[in-house]
């Protein structure tokens, strides 16, 4: 393999978006590049959905139009992130290889006319995708405009699982490699239940639709298999490009919006982490979901700068109610991503499409044209980012980690759990929101990671917990860490089998409690917890908690567990382990987390509500991004230079309603006053 640079050959922060010139006549192309220069665009993604125009029939290629586009962009100083168009194979491919279509769990083949819908296990698709990637790399590897490669688009969307004949064949091979024998497979899947024992590999099928609930261990493995097959497709294209090019290769994730791919595994395969993020319009505080996605993108890349490959200038087109962004919101969104480690701010897409499924999706150049508010804000954002070159390469540091485990999510989301109201995303959001409102920066981590650098680790939804990972968490507490574990955690092992010793057993050393019985609440029922005189409201869940050598800090006031322990704290070694056996919301968590922070030696920022501050660090310099999400100006202590205005800040910084400041100041050592 050729060596790869750490970042595309660009100066400053990358700014731009998807560019789809094939949707427009040639006379529009020159207008586009002129307007891109006006907007400060320096990078566009090209070719992502153009397979049918590049390979017009099998093995017959036409690159003339792409040559023209790339040369035009280069002549205007705009770099190219060149996509492989393999998320949408052409009509001729599906006509030639109809058995390469995705088959649903119900056995229905998916038709042509959308994106995706191709089996990642199809050998014909694998060969065709490597062929087009090779042809592109052969032609453009040394083109000076091409600074990065972009394989596929949003792997796993719109569908992940495939139950085609190709998939079943590869599934059996994957299982044989994973387990080695049918005895091992039967043990892992617990096939003694319901008489599911296998005596021949040929009898092992995919967990397609069944008369009742399918084997959960089998379905969990199928999620792992699907993720593996998608990643194998990426690796095939990546390696074909890498054989011919030294430029970095990425693919765009969907952190916090699509859980079908294990991004911890994927991040090891890309040169640069890239993410697509779109606000949830129904969320009145969508800036918090944005922060989760940004922190997760940085975390899976182990802290390295990353690229926001797509977000929207205003409304999207695919949610039930596509709420437009308010004036200034696009800049706040963009600079929040930048504050959380993104060195590239890109959009879908440059020019709004007149046809197709996404014609109502906002764009940098909207249907309303250059006189629109959105385009004015696009130009303004480009100018702002042009003043932030020195931020590039700096990093974010966090004292708190929240556990985020895709395999645990896959397992928890299977059928027949104790309550339909169990929701790992909700629990992560509740704990994260509490920390966000307290001004505390967060990394995400796996339970098996080295957690020693974190003062506090939170497990909001660790339903699946391997024994060795539990040992890691126990050691973390013993060696001085503070651990918070929420309900319905440490329930099963990697095969979705309940741990020996019962619920929560693997974390007994850190927590000093175990769960005798789950006591889910009826829909809509709330109950109270007395936490040292404070009354906390909670819903969905209670537990019959048996306390060993932990201290009871909260007691159920009512509900099926009335009078019994609800929240506990245990000193273990040099650290502490907290257990919260019910579901308080972010507001109700405040009282508990105040005590947790004291154990961990962490102090909330004391910022006004609705003000977000994120710091990036480089050497002896801090870059502080302050975002005012409120409708009133805020003033706070600060020293340094506001990079967006070049004003010197002496003592106090005022950020206007809905505005952002990016300040450079001397590095503040941990624990020193700001």
Image (cartoon, rainbow, N blue to C red):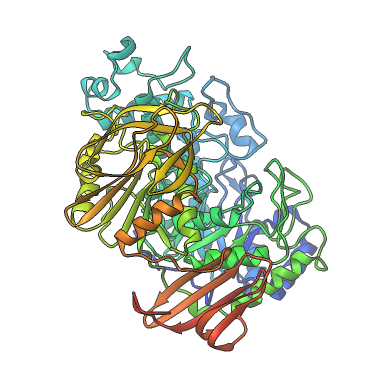
Residue visible at 61% across and 46% down in the picture: 51
Q: In which quarter of the image is residue 560?
A: top left
The picture places residue 555, in percent across and down from the top left corner, at 36, 39
The picture places residue 160, in percent across and down from the top left corner, at 50, 35
Residue visible at 56% across and 58% down in the picture: 309
Q: In this view, does 319 lie to the left or right of 161?
A: right
User: In the image, is residue 195 above or below residue 341?
Assistant: above
The picture places residue 533, in percent across and down from the top left corner, at 41, 49
Residue visible at 52% across and 77% down in the picture: 11
User: In the image, is residue 582 above or below residue 271?
Assistant: above
Q: Is residue 428 left or right of residue 158?
A: left
Seen from the viewer's position, the closer of residues 52 and 180 is: 180
Residue 514 visible, this orientation: yes
User: In the image, is residue 358 above or below residue 199?
Assistant: below
Q: Is residue 613 left or right of residue 70?
A: left
Seen from the viewer's position, the closer of residues 292 and 432 is: 432
Seen from the viewer's position, the closer of residues 464 and 78 is: 464
Residue 198 visible, this orientation: no
The picture places residue 215, in percent across and down from the top left corner, at 38, 20
């Amino acid at each position: 393999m050729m060596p790869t640079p750490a970042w595309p050959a660009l100066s400053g922060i990358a700014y731009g978006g998807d560019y789809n010139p094939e949707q427009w006549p040639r006379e529009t192309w020159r207008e586009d590049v002129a307007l891109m220069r006006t907007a400060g665009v320096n990078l566009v993604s090209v070719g992502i959905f153009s397979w049918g125009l590049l390979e017009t029939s099998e093995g017959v290629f036409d690159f003339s139009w792409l040559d023209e586009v790339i040369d035009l962009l280069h002549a205007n100083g705009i770099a190219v992130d060149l996509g492989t168009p393999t998320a949408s194979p052409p009509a001729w491919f599906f006509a030639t290889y109809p058995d390469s279509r995705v088959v649903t769990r119900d056995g229905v083949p998916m038709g042509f006319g959308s994106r995706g819908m191709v089996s990642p296990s199809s050998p014909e698709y694998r060969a065709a995708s490597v062929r087009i990637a090779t042809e592109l790399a052969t032609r453009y590897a040394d083109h000076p405009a091409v600074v990065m490669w972009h394989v596929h688009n949003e792997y796993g969307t719109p569908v992940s699982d495939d139950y085609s004949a190709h998939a079943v064949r590869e599934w059996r091979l994957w299982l044989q490699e994973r387990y080695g024998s049918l005895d091992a497979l039967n043990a892992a899947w617990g096939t003694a239940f319901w008489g599911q024992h296998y005596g021949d590999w040929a009898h092992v099928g995919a967990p397609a639709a069944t008369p009742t609930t399918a084997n959960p261990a089998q379905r969990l493995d199928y999620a792992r298999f699907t993720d593996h097959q998608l990643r194998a497709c990426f690796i095939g294209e990546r390696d074909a490009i890498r054989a011919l090019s030294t430029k970095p290769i990425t693919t765009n994730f969907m952190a916090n919006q699509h859980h079908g791919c294990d991004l911890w595994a994927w991040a090891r395969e890309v040169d640069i982490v890239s993410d697509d993020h779109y606000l949830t319009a129904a969320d009145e505080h969508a800036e918090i979901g944005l922060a989760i996605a940004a922190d997760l993108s940085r975390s899976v890349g182990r802290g390295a700068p990353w690229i926001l490959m797509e977000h929207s200038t205003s409304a999207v087109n695919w949610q039930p109610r596509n709420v437009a962004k308010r004036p200034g919101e696009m800049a706040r969104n963009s600079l929040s991503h930048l504050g959380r480690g993104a060195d590239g701010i890109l959009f879908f897409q440059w020019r709004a499409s007149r046809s197709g499924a996404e014609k109502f999706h906002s764009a940098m150049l909207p249907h309303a044209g250059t006189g629109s508010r959105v385009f004015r804000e696009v130009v303004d954002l480009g100018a702002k980012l042009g003043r932030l070159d020195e931020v590039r390469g700096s990093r974010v540091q966090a004292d708190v980690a929240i556990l985020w485990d895709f395999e645990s999510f896959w397992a928890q989301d299977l059928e027949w759990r104790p309550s339909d109201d169990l929701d790992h995303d909700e629990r992560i959001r509740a704990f994260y929101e509490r920390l966000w409102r307290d001004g505390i920066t967060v990394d995400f981590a796996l339970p098996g990671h080295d957690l020693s650098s974190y003062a506090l680790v939170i497990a909001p939804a660790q339903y699946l917990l391997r024994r060795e990972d539990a040992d890691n968490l126990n050691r973390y507490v013993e060696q001085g860490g503070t651990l918070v574990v929420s309900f319905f955690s440490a329930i099963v092992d990697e095969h979705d089998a309940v741990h020996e010793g019962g619920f929560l057993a693997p974390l007994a050393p850190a927590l000093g409690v175990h769960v005798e019985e789950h006591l889910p609440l009826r829909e809509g029922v709330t109950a109270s917890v007395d936490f040292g005189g404070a009354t906390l409201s909670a819903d969905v869940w209670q537990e019959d908690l048996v306390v060993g050598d932990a201290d009871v800090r909260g007691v159920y006031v009512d509900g099926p567990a009335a009078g019994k322990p609800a929240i506990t704290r245990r000193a273990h070694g040099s650290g502490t382990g907290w257990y919260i056996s019910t579901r308080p919301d972010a507001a109700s968590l405040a009282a508990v987390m105040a005590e947790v922070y004291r154990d961990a030696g962490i102090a909330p920022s004391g910022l006004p509500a609705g003000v977000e501050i994120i710091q990036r660090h480089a050497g002896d310099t801090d870059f502080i991004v302050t975002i005012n999400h409120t409708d009133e100006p805020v003033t706070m202590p600060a020293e340094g230079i506001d990079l967006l205005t070049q004003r010197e800040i002496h003592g106090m910084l005022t950020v206007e309603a809905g505005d952002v400041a990016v300040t450079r100041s001397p590095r503040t050592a941990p624990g020193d006053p700001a």
